[in-house]
Image (cartoon, grey):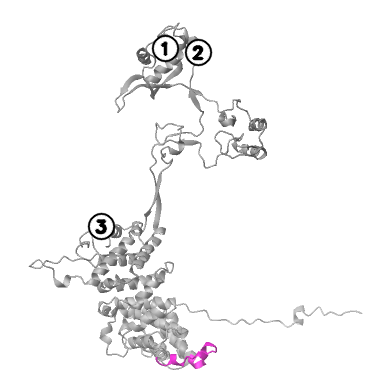
Amino acid sequence: MATFINRTVPAQTYYRQTQTYYQQRPAPDVRDDYERWYTENSPNNRMSLSIRSGIDTEVGWALDRLCRLVRNELFVFSAIPGIIDGLFDWPEWYVTEGHKQVTHRALLFSEKPEFSRRHRFALESLFVLRNAALHEPNARELALHPHTIPLIMDALHNLDHSKDENAEPLLHIMDIFQVIAAHYPIDQYRAFRRSNPVPPLLKIASESNNRTMIISSLSVLTALFSNPGNSTHLTPNSPALSTSIRCLPLFNDKPLIDACLNYMYIHLSLPAMARAFLLQPEMPGVLKVLTSLLLHEQHPLQKPMSLDVTGPIHIIPSTTQPTRDHELTKEELEGLVSKPEPQRCFDWMKLMFVAKPEGELTQVDFWNLYRDAFTPYADLYPLLVASDVIKNVTQVFPIAQAMVLQEPVQRFIVRGVDRRKDPAVVERFKCSWDRSQCNAQSFDTPGSLYDHLLQHLAQNDASELPCLWSSCSHPATSKHRLSSHILTHLSSLQPPQKHPSQSDTITLPHKDAPYPVPDPTNRPLPPPRHTVITYEVPIADPPTTSLTALLIIRILFRTSFASAEVAPRADADHFGFPGVVEEPEEPDGSEAADGALTGDEHEGEKRGRKAFVGIRKLLDGVKIHDDVLMSWILEMADASISNPGE
């Protein structure tokens, strides 16, 4: 069967040609003025109209764009007329009415769509206001806007800080209030309903378990009380102060510590509050924690330094050859006896003594050695008299000299010579049986000595024997047990190995110290081989938290030592606050009645001085790079020594 193929038609015409359609997307407009068309400075600006239109899609679009625009520092409310009024609408609805619509049902089920949108609009509006307030022109406009303070006060008094749904709105509102709080005089707004923000802020700071809420509330209170006109609202038992003290030991949480320290500084800067704080039982502990914070933060800013102060060291080898005084051998004695005097005396001295500048012998010992050596031969070879023997010393040893030491008991000595020393044989394996009365020669190995001791045991017929080795007090026991016990008296054939850290030399207490000594346990302590002093020096200024803590300590110090008898005077070298001002005396020489301390103030100063005595050792460890700040530390430490608490 043949197959017909039409070769005149191109192969590609048998199939439908595929076509690809590409949808061309417009390139993003990245020009700098891309958003200018809806941010123009005109009353009919689309952004302003959209946010106040009441149409959810338009409001959502406007807030979405504002959340992006507000990240730019060039964004200012004055550039978009009416925008700031529209941003207050939804937050005001939530803090007055919206928060009431949140029920326990919302914890398990989603909110109604309409309420969810309004809630989101309120949060986004607060987000825009909060971020914009960080820019100074916007902060000034918010401070002057008539809706700002009512919104803040309604939020602080109406919203329950313990509910999760109110946490984010409250945080945004407290951040806004923190920017303008320093310029908010509380007493000027008494005519307004619930115009005092201090009670709700104190409640949040003392009751909230939310770390961020605590930081925000303390920061707002710090800004509020930085205005001197608001200091009348401070109380000695402020809940915010208690919260700051409670959170103070959390050194690793820098933002929280910073907020606590800033509030404590503002609170204690008022002299009345500082004096009242000295009477609180937490005051000594707070001082210790503040000083510990200085020590904690100074370690990363220090550089270790070393100073070698090693003095002269005198060492000798730890293993020395034992020596003994030289005695005349039989051959040496036979060679000396027949020699005529004084040559015999000269040669005898050369054999028995050596020149040694620090050596010393008594003249009696010198004469006795000569007499004992040659008296047996005095019949044939007469001896020299004692005075001639002593005089001959300088003939043999020019550096030697006979002298008399004028001490409570006169001593006749010969200085400049010493006995000649011979190496002594160490008898490691000498038998000490029969209380060291055994006459056997020294053995070469411990095994040979042990066999010898077994012979001592075998020679005794008693069934039980005490140990007779030297001064051993082992009670009587069977020979079998005693044969095991005597092994404890045998030295090892190999000397014990030294630890790798043990030196091969011994340090002497001083240059002329003798070694070995009869009683090594009572010898003077030698100096250390190496004496290196290691210390740390600060290389940079401390962080802001340390500076704030130091200012708080300084305030408490000046308050504790504020009485005229013990206070450091304010001069060129001593400054800080509260200072002591010299007041002129009254004409009659008596003090003014207003300057007298009350009983509580005197007790507070007494407690404060006692607390500073308690932290004096901690203050000694504080090192600060700045000389002025370091002088504060030294002044406080010195005052704690010279003026201790009663």
Q: CA distance from mark 2 to mark 3?
A: 77 Å
Residue beneath disc 3 = 642
Residue beneath disc 1 = 345
Q: Residue furthest right?
A: 1
Q: Residue furthest front?
A: 462
Please say if 461 is above or below 559.
above
Report the span colored magenta. 96-115
Horizontal arrangement in the rendering, residue 618 relative to residue 59 (left or right): left
Horizontal arrangement in the rendering, residue 222 relative to residue 46 (left or right): left
Q: CA distance from mark 2 to mark 1?
A: 13 Å
Q: Which amino acid type is shown beneath numbered disc 3? A: Ser
Q: Residue at x 19, y 64 (%)?
A: 564
Mark 1 lies on a secondary structure that is helix
Q: Nearer the viewer, residue 530 or 13?
A: 530
Circle 3 crowding by C-alpha within 10 Å: few under 14, some 14–19, many from 20: few
Mark 2 lies on a secondary structure that is helix
Q: Which amino acid type is shown beneath numbered disc 1? A: Cys
In the picture, residue 409 is in which quadrant?
Answer: top left
**Considering only order in the chain, which callout, 3 or 1, is on the residue closer to the N terminus?**
1
